[in-house]
Amino acid sequence: MNESFLEGLKKITEQCFAQEKMSSHTTFRAGGPAEYYIRPKRAQVAEIVSLCKAWEIPWLVIGNGSNLLVGDKGIAGVVIELGREASEVAAEGNVIKAEAGAMLSAVARTAADHSLTGMEFASGIPGTIGGAVVMNAGAYGGEMKQIIRKVTVLTPEGQEKVLTLEELDLGYRHSCIPENDYIVLDTELELKTGNSEVIQEQMAKLRSQRSKKQPLEYASAGSTFKRPEGYFAGKLIQDAGLRGFQVGDAQVSEKHCGFVINRGGATAAEIRELIRQVQDKVEANSGVRLETEVRFLGDF
């Protein structure tokens, strides 16, 4: 622990913590401590990155922690959470501007309140708008690239840059952001005028479907695996006889085989080992190697 560096962080933001348990900040509810954990406002991000560079201390950015598995031994360096401190949302005409930390559910509610349609598909995804941009999140036939107008990012050089939809290079669970080491600061969405009641009804219908089909009562990172071309991950896992398969307290959901869940006391190592065994067993059964949607961070 570098006390001088920590004091430098605290001068930028009061939302600064040492040895913060990542199990409190990921939807898997597993993982060891972050050496430094901060929740900056949008305007503070560039200064924090500059400080990290000056001290040669690594950093990474997370949102709601809904697509992450952090190792039990934790993460060295700085974890920057773009969450509630960077979550302003505003609507003007048919455009919604949202800071990176805004929850998708909050942005969808704002859209519905302003009779704007096109974002209903994302209303139940438990992530932030920044994370959704990074992975071009999607559900129920919709995806972020259908509604993004432009995105403001922080470059590795510490400059703000506006990316158009075309420049984002959005594809299935892909954008240009990770490969360029950009940090999403805010996003503009372009929606269409609709009927508020109809929009609310559609959001409620999708919430009901999600509740019936997904193991929302357990900690998880949502869909664990990407959809293989021509297949469904959950069906391949089921066909391999892995419904309910467990490693420790980590389990393939009996409700939806595409979800790996934490039954309450799973370690990150158990979750990762379960994922590896599922990949091996599915490949042996079908010849298809599943790729994870989940990001693995830190030391296991």
Image: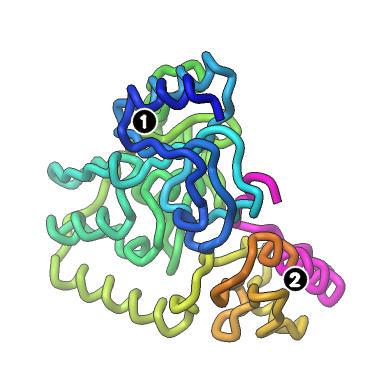
Mark closest to the chain's N terminus, 1 or 2? 1
Q: Position of residue 229 (x, y in %)?
A: 67, 63
Q: Which residues are magenta?
A: 274-300
- Residue type at mark 1 is Thr
What residue would you read off at disc 2? 278
**Vertical side of 16 occupied by 102: above or below:** below
Q: Position of residue 292 (x, y in %)?
A: 66, 58
Q: Nearest to the eye among marks 1 and 2: give it.
A: 2
Number of marks drawn: 2
Kindly identify the residue that appears in the image at 44 percent across and 47 percent down.
Answer: 131
**Vertical side of 85 occupied by 285: above or below:** below
**Vertical side of 203 occupied by 5: above or below:** above
Which quadrant of the structure image shows residue 269? bottom right
- Residue type at mark 2 is Val
Q: Nearer the viewer, residue 183 or 34?
A: 34
| Image position of 34 (left or right of 287) | left
Kindly identify the residue that appears in the image at 46 percent across and 18 percent down.
Answer: 51
Is residue 40 visible to us here? yes
| Image position of 119 (left or right of 232) | left
